[in-house]
Image: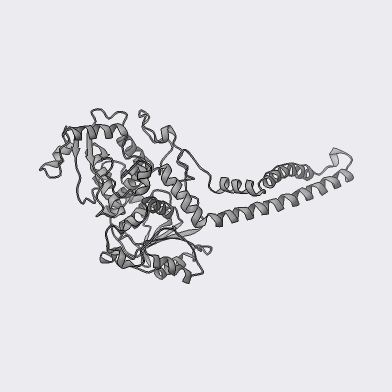
Amino acid sequence: MTRGAQRDMWRHQFPASCTGRRLMLTRWPGLHHGMGSMVHVMGAYLSIALRSNRTLVVMPGTFERATRECEDLHKAQQWECYFFPISSPGCVQEAMAAHDRGEAPDIWAQEGREDMLAGATQVVYLALSSLFGDIDAARLRWGKPWLDRPHTIQEAASISTQEPDWMMARWWRAQTTRFLLRWPSAHLCHVINRVRHVSYGLLVANRVAAVAAQQGSIVESLNATVAASSAATSAATSSAEERDPLDDLLLLIAAKARETGREILAANGNATRVRSLQSHVWPNRGRSGCHNLPSSIPAAFHNPSSSQQPHGGSMDVGGEVFMVRPVVSMHVRLSDKGSEMGLHPLPSFLVMASRLRQHRPDLRHVWLSTEVQSVIDETNDHPDWTFFYTNSSRVNSAEQMKDAHENARQPMGIIFANLLITSECDYFIGSLGSNWNRLIDELRSTNGRLYAGLISFTFGL
């Protein structure tokens, strides 16, 4: 049902023509919202637009969390610096033209705004300081897929069961989050690749080199065995009728082995080896330059009558981010969230991760995200785990995070790269009392990792 929901939202937001189409104009929430909260608010706007049969249009240049990197790309304060546009350029032009002419009334402060949303006015403007929980669009179509989903959230030591309305809200939020965070931009793909290179690129490259060397040894051994067998067979047999069929099979294998051996030997030169490893481990896929980026979206879910297709018509969106597996992701929050939910230190997360080893004894890799440097320093005290994390600036203590704008210390590209890599890990341990943790859960719910479940210290929606 995720594929159907994504297809329908795409057709709604990228119509064949925006001329005369009813539009709902809004803007990104301000910096007083965290990034997770901002995405959820925009998801609520999208829900209102779908329910009102209006295409949602976001004012260009209102994504204030876009950092300096976007200014260098001439996309200052634009969501498109990191992800694909939310609506078609034609609809943006229509909405902004009406707004500039004063023909897009702000309906938030007016009575009867539901009637205005449903009315004939082509463009209405709706921007709230805080908006959550509008999930009525989920009731209008797609049946009730949330009732068929298993309970996959473990809180404390038991599986948490939720009421149908909560399950519906979780399903619908996952759909809007997936739609908003689809198709990372070329810039964000470059950041993701750089983060992977720095974090675990050398480890993976060494593993690939070891496998290549092992394959070379196998080929040489096989060639020697086949050559000896061929010589013995030629000396011992005088007619084709007396040949063992296995000899013909060995000769066929030898021919293929020599071909494979030449490929391996060709990759053993230093310069060639580097190119070969990069080609094998980090190949660039599609015009975005991303290797196997997450997407549960079908290859042809666009509106056949619409010319608005991503990447100039290409839809090569791949499958998964290349990871060292198995790996568990942890988001250790030790900041201003302490006033809203219980906070837990790194050792508590590792206790939970140790329980996962009962199911996956080979689990030893951790993708760690946190805003506090002391958590990173603490990883040295746990040598039985291998930790990967972004090499970025962090605050020295939880107290420094009390400043609401402290999140801006890190480039948003690094933050989004962390989010997408985290969502692709095999397991996730976090706290659903945090909007950011819920973003991770929502992405995992729509990229094939729903049944892997998650372990949450706290619960929320």
Relative placement, left or right, of 115 versus 93 is left
Q: In which quarter of the image is residue 350?
A: bottom left
Image location of residue 188, percent across then percent down = 41, 46
Residue 427 visible in rendering: yes
Q: Which residue is drawn at the image coordinates 43% and 42% (left, top)?
A: 186
Residue 74 spot, x, y in % from top left: 35, 40
- Residue at horizontal 32 percent and vertical 51 percent from the top: 147
Q: Nearer the viewer, residue 384 or 62?
A: 62
- The residue furthest bottom is 381
Q: Determine the residue positioned at 28% across, 66% down.
A: 338
Q: Which colour scheme is used?
A: one colour
Q: Residue 71 lies in what quarter of the image?
A: top left
Q: Please identify the quarter of the rendering in which residue 206 is found.
A: bottom right
**151 is higher (above) or lower (below) than 227:** below
Q: Which of 292 and 159 is in front in this view?
A: 292
Question: Would residue 96 be found to the left or right of residue 298 on screen?
Answer: left
Total numbered badges shown on the rendered structure: 0
Query: Is 75 placed above or below 366 here?
Result: above
Asked if residue 51 can be seen in this view, the reply is no
From the image, which quarter does the C terminus lie in? bottom left
User: Which image quarter holds the N terminus?
Assistant: top left
Residue 405 lies, in percent from the top left, at 28, 57
Residue 15: x percent and y percent?
31, 32
Please identify the residue farthest to the front as the structure is shown: 72
